[in-house]
C-alpha cells in the first residue's frame, strides 16, 4: 500500500510509546491519522502535536469503540489502516503472580486471580480483536486500491512474552500469544476481501512503562539493556514504527508474526 495523504489510519494506544511513534511515522508521510486512547490528556496533546484526530476510546468498551470509529471516519474518511497498540501487562496497581504460589510466611497456597487473568485478556486480546473486526468491516465497504484487490492492512501488537513469558506473566503471555495465534486465521478470513494483517512481537522497548524503570532502579535498567544481545539497548519506538510501516507498505507481507527484539530470549525470571 502506498502511504500518503489519500490514506486514513487509526492507531490505538496512539497517545504514547509504540503507538505514538507509529502515529508520527504515518503523519510524516501525510497519512490522515486518528488516535484511539483512553487517556484524554496525553491523547489530545499527542494529536495536537502530530496533527492527528483524537478519539477518547477505551478498547474494552464496545460502544466507545464503535463511537470512536464513527468519529474517526467522519473526520478522516474510512480508514484503510489499523495499527492496534493499546494494551499492557496488567491492570494499574496490580502485581502479576504465579499460576499458583505459596505465601512466603504462612505457606498457604495462592491461586492466580481469575479476575486479573480475564482483565488482561480482555484488554489485550479482546480489545485488539474488537478493533480489528470494526476496522475490517469498514474496509470491506471500500473499493480495492489495485488489481490485487487490496482494501486495507492491519498491524497488531503482541510481545515476546507470547513465546517466552516469564515467571509471574501468565496472563500477559496468554493474552499476547492469543494475538499471535489469531493473526494467520484473520489473514485467511479476510483474504477474499483484500485485507492483510501482521503482528509484531516487541522485545524490551524504550517507552514510558520501561523508561520509568530507569528512575526507579538504575541497576535493573542497566541489566535490561545489557540483556539484549545486539544492539545492547532497549528498542526504540521508531524501530517499532519502521517495522509497522514495512508491514503496511509491503503487500506480500501477510499472516506473519515477527519478533522485534535484538535477538533477546527472555529467561524464566
Ligand atoms: N514497551 C515494551 O517493552 C513492550 C514490549 C512488548 C509489547 N509491548 C506492547 O506494546 C503496546 C504499547 O505499549 P507501550 O510500551 O507503547 O506502552 P505505553 O504505556 O507507552 O502506551 C500504551 C498506550 O495505550 C493506552 N491504553 C492502555 N489501555 C487502553 C485502553 N483500554 N483503551 C485505549 N487505550 C489504552 C495508554 O493510555 C497509552 O497511551 C502494548 O500492547 C504493550 O503490551 C510493549
Image (cartoon, rainbow, N blue to C red):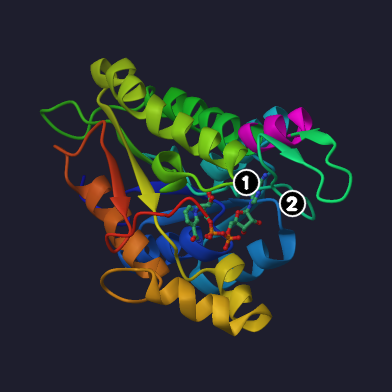
Q: Position of residue 172 (x, y in %)?
A: 57, 41
Q: Position of residue 15 (x, y in %)?
A: 59, 62
Would residue 120 be counted in the magenta stretch?
A: yes
Side (left or right) of 85 relative to 115: left
Residue at the image position 25 percent from the left and 20 percent from the top: 191
Whether residue 138 is visible here, answered yes or no, is: yes
As helix, strand or loop, the secondary structure at mark 1 comes to loop
Residue 101 horizontal side relative to residue 230, left or right: right
Q: Which residue is mark 2?
A: 95
User: Residue at the right extreme?
Assistant: 106
Q: Which residues are magenta?
A: 112-121
Q: Is mark 2 within 8 Å of ligand 1?
A: no
Look at 67% across and 67% down and name the residue there: 42
Labels 2, 1: front one: 1
SS state under label 2: loop
Q: Which mark is residue 181?
A: none
Pointer 2 local density, CA inside 10 Å: few below 14, some 14–19, many at least 20:
few
Contact between marks 2 and 1 (CB within 8 A): the answer is yes
First of labels 2, 1 by sequence position: 2
Q: Nearer the viewer, residue 73 or 1?
A: 1
Q: Quadrant of residue 144?
A: top left
- Up-down relation of residue 160 to residue 116 (above or below): below
Residues at marks 2 and 1, CA–CA distance in whole angstroms:
9 Å
| Marking on residue 168 | 1
From the viewer's perspective, is residue 102 above or below residue 246? above
Instruction: Please report the residue visible at 25 percent of the width from the left and 47 percent of the height from the top.
Output: 247
Within the image, what quadrant is residue 82 found in? Answer: top left
Q: Position of residue 178 (x, y in %)?
A: 47, 29
Amino acid at each position: 500500500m502506498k502511504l500518503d495523504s489519500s490514506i486514513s489510519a487509526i492507531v490505538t494506544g496512539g497517545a504514547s510509546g509504540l503507538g505514538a511513534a507509529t502515529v508520527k511515522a504515518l503523519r510524516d508521510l501525510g497519512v490522515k491519522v486518528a488516535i484511539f486512547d483512553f487517556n484524554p490528556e496525553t491523547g489530545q496533546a499527542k494529536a495536537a502535536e502530530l496533527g492527528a484526530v483524537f478519539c477518547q476510546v477505551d478498547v474494552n468498551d464496545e460502544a466507545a469503540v464503535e463511537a470512536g470509529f464513527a468519529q474517526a471516519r467522519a473526520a478522516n474518511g474510512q480508514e484503510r489502516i489499523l495499527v492496534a497498540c493499546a494494551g499492557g501487562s496488567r491492570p494499574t496497581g496490580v502485581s502479576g503472580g504465579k499460576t499458583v504460589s505459596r505465601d512466603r510466611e504462612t505457606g498457604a497456597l495462592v491461586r492466580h486471580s481469575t479476575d486479573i487473568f480475564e482483565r488482561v485478556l480482555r484488554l489485550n486480546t479482546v480489545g485488539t480483536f474488537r478493533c480489528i473486526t470494526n476496522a475490517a468491516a469498514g474496509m470491506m465497504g471500500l473499493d480495492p486500491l489495485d488489481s490485487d484487490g487490496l482494501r486495507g492492512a492491519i498491524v497488531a501488537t503482541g510481545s515476546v512474552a507470547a513465546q517466552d513469558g516469564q515467571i509471574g506473566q501468565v496472563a500477559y503471555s496468554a493474552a499476547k500469544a492469543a494475538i499471535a495465534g489469531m493473526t494467520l486465521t484473520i489473514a485467511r478470513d479476510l483474504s477474499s476481501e483484500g485485507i492483510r494483517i501482521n503482528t509484531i512481537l516487541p522485545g524490551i522497548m524504550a517507552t514510558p512503562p520501561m523508561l520509568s524503570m530507569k528512575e526507579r532502579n538504575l541497576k535493573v535498567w542497566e541489566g535490561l539493556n545489557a540483556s539484549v544481545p545486539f544492539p545492547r539497548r532497549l528498542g526504540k519506538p521508531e524501530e517499532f514504527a519502521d517495522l509497522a510501516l514495512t508491514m503496511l507498505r509491503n503487500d506480500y507481507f501477510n499472516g506473519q508474526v515477527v519478533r522485534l527484539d535484538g535477538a533477546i530470549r527472555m529467561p524464566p525470571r
